[in-house]
Image (cartoon, rainbow, N blue to C red):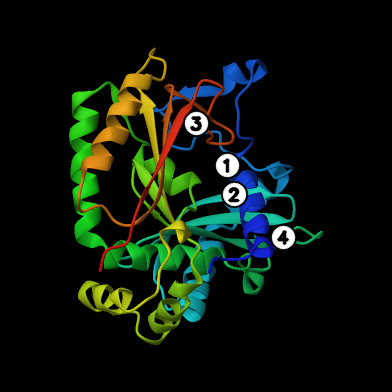
Amino acid sequence: MFLNKKLIIPLLSVTILLTGCLMKNETEKDNMVSVEDYTGQGYELPNGEENDKIAEAHRKEIDKATKQFFLDKYKTKVKVHNIVGNKDGATIFVESIGEPHFYTYAIVPINSQKKVIKNGIWTQEGQVETSIRSGIYGMAYHNQLKELDNYLNKTVSKYPIIGLNEKAIQNTRSTGFTTPYYYISVLDYAFDPLFDTYLQNPKTTKEEWKNKVQSLKMDPEGYLITIQLFMGEGKKPDQKILDTIIADLKSMNNLPPGDYSVYLNDNNILADSSDGTSDNTIERKLSVSITK
């Protein structure tokens, strides 16, 4: 059983708000940056210019309040990487310290008197919880993910493809367990008890998570592994490379379970939205079943 549409739709809406529109168009070419050079520079949210300046002036206070918020509510230490003004306040991009490892965000309100409401920090329903579940998945399937990581590292050295800059991830992403090549989304309600376990014992080990996952009744459709790759400078997405990656993944026997989507983009990212997809982006999918 998965997160219902009432929860998924708001999550997707905010994801689109954070990452911008899904396709680049001709009028946006001047705002494009090569993926090698993109670290989040120029990233912005709608109607956030004024609050961006206010938040920057209060960065130290927001940083401190955000760290305390995550520690109190989610028993998690975080680093604050980026604070971006939005219409009603500022969005705070954070990374967890240690494991489970994940990227997510919180929001600090700024009122009409331009006052930062530090004790009013909040998160969208399900956003951080889903990110933590994603990090737990990363711990439970640590060995299988190492195999995926090793394969992708070899692939980018073999073909003219690359992943996302780590700084860009830190400054613009809120996609849970995230690497330069992929991110993981956990939508299966079967993981809910594990989130509760985490709040009770944040120091739960990889081996303990692995054992707990073994007892769950899981459906691979509730675990989404999204692989995002980019071509080298000046190159268009290559269907042969994408087909080879899919064939290789299908032949691997120890991948973490889930529904895989593999996207191959060109070399450009839209700076103000951090969106790397375009009308020439190509995609293929595959599903990996769960083995106990």
Q: Which residue is mark 1?
A: 19
Q: Residue furthest top?
A: 234
Answer above or below: position of 153 versus 161: below
Tell me which label, 3 or 4, sits earlier in the chain: 4
Answer above or below: position of 258 versus 197: above
Q: Residue at x 64, y 35 (%)?
A: 21
- Label 1 Cα neighbours within 10 Å, binned few <14 / some 14-19 / many ≥20: many
Amino acid type, label 1 = Thr
The reply to whether discs 1 and 3 touch (Cβ–Cβ < 8 Å) is no
Tell me which label, 4 or 1, sits earlier in the chain: 1
Q: Position of residue 214 (x, y in %)?
A: 29, 75
Q: Position of residue 234 (x, y in %)?
A: 39, 12
Q: Which residue is mark 4?
A: 110
Element type where label 2 sits in the image: helix
Q: Nearer the viewer, mark 2 or mark 4?
A: 2
The reply to whether discs 1 and 2 touch (Cβ–Cβ < 8 Å) is yes
> Alpha carbon of mark 3 to alpha carbon of mark 4: how far?
30 Å
